[in-house]
Amino acid sequence: MDCPEFDKLIKDFFTCDRQELTAIFDEYLSVMEADMSLAPGGLMSRNYETAQANPEINTIPGNLKDARDAIFPFFWGTDEWFSRLHLENVKGPANYASLIGAIACLLKNPNLCVDTYSQRSNELEVKAATSLANLIFYHTDSPWGVFTMGGTISNLYGGKIGIEKVCPGAMAKGLQGCRLVGIVSEAAHYSNRTLAGWLGIGTENLHAVSTDKSFAMQLDHLEELLDRLYGEEKTVAFVIATFGSTDASGVDDVSRIRKIIEEKASQYNKPVPQLHVDAAVGWVLSLLTEYDTAKNPFRVDEDVIPLILRAQELSKGLMDADSVTIDFHKMGWGHYPSSAFIVNRRTDLRYLFRTKSSVPYFSEAEYRRDPALFTLECSRPAIGPYSVMASLNGIGLKGYQMLVAHSLEIAHFARKKIDELDYCKVLNADTIGATVLWWVLPKGRDAKKIYDRLVSGKLSENEYKRYFTEIKHLFDKRSESMDIRKDARLSFTSSIGYSPHGVRVPAWKAVFFNPKTDRHVVEQVIRSIEDL
Ligand SMILES: *Cc1c(COP(=O)(O)O)cnc(C)c1O
């Protein structure tokens, strides 16, 4: 090609112009600061109507400012969730150590599929996966893990290993008539249903064990279910326990589940199912494992200490898991995607191995280290390892302990304050986590008594339907009348993950995820409820 424009193209888009790049980066930061001063939520209204009708591609080459301008309105129009008033979900600000890591990753743009495409970034992945494994398992001889696109995919890996364990050769031959089922709790995340569908088990063959009022799997029901399924000649591929349910922070007793599945499998002469733990949200509790509750160096509220002690006890259960999902992009305050699938024993990955002949262009791949030989994905981003290692070492273990303890403390404070109102009832008082679920009923109603009657089965359908309508109505009323500059943004769930007598229970929801959310925010939430 003999074309001067081509040289210009190389100069503008493939040559690092430090000044130009830092100038644009600086502009982004200014814009971000500007929108931080605004009330959270909906900076600009969407324009879906014409988004598809007006695709735009510039005709002639432009420059980096054109690149900036192309995305600018959407950058400006997107809330970065830095505001301490965002309490809707496990979504919030990513920490800046993670940004430092993520930018480094973007600059090198490694592809984690094989060592040759990523060099030391693959090494960083090994380090990050091992650090996380040591946190959750204390110590294991041969932990291993990979970063995936998200908790859904990490859970999918757990499910897939289970299928291969109980139905050998399924990867090559398909399910061959194996009548497979999977088990979760009623409070499990919907991603488990997704993976049951995608893995060919079928969403209808994923069985949900009911939970108790602390949102934990009812273990006697698990035993009954296993008896029934094995009695029907079904093969259980996996049990996915939940360690921190998304809405309620419920935690399943992993150690006891381990005992039960081993006993039942042996009783029916079946292979032991994979015990995968979905700790996408709850894994952070294991950061508190070594917190000295007697000395209490951070002077955490005295009434939160029992919660930390219980978290320490429950975290021990993770040692009994075969594999675990960790979403660092949730309570690690990292960037998307930073989800890790961690196995307790590296040999379990052999169930996923491909032969080298099936990945011809990775002929150099090495079983000892190259994830391309077993990952679902081919190309994989390295944001996860960069975000994890930058965050863990920037913030440090003690820093993370403070962040997690603060979340627990504020959530606990909110529970206490809400429960002081007669017409309110906190529904997840027995759980440990950043979430709070509660009812707001019209003043004059005794919310606690109504809840007790629901749990003991004494409410008629007409009654609970009326109460549920009132709860939703008051939520909508607050949403419409709230002052977005001072009232926190809450959310509403139509089913909390505990269904007494089969009744799906709705609730108001707040997640104390943002480290800047303090007691004043909670007190203002209380005021806004009182004013309804
Ligand atoms: C968020 C979540 C998932 C799904 O994770 P993604 O990263 O959003 O795909 C799975 N399980 C639990 C408990 C979750 O909270």
Image: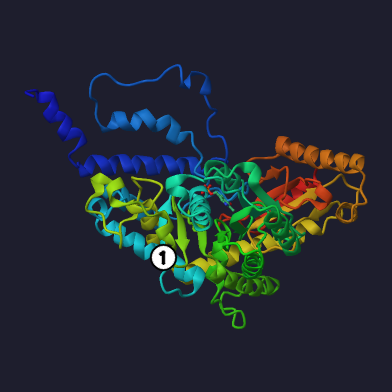
Could you tell me which quadrant the C terminus lies in? top right
**Left or right, residue 396 beside residue 61:** right
**Left or right, residue 91 beside residue 384:** right
Q: Residue at x 20, y 41 (%)?
A: 17
Q: Position of residue 504 (x, y in %)?
A: 78, 45
Under circle 1, the secondary element is: helix
Q: Position of residue 167 (x, y in %)?
A: 52, 53
In this rendered view, identify the residue nearer to me: 408 or 323: 323
Q: Outermost residue toward the left?
A: 2
Q: Position of residue 263 (x, y in %)?
A: 65, 69
In this rendered view, identify the residue nearer to me: 440 or 41: 440
Q: What residue is disc 1 on?
A: 347
Q: Residue at x 57, y 62 (%)?
A: 271
Whether residue 348 is visible: yes
In this rendered view, identify the residue nearer to me: 317 or 331: 317
Could you tell me which quadrant the N terminus lies in? top left
Q: Is residue 74 above or below residue 170?
A: above
Q: Residue at x 61, y 79 (%)?
A: 293
User: What amino acid is labelled 1 in the image?
Assistant: Thr
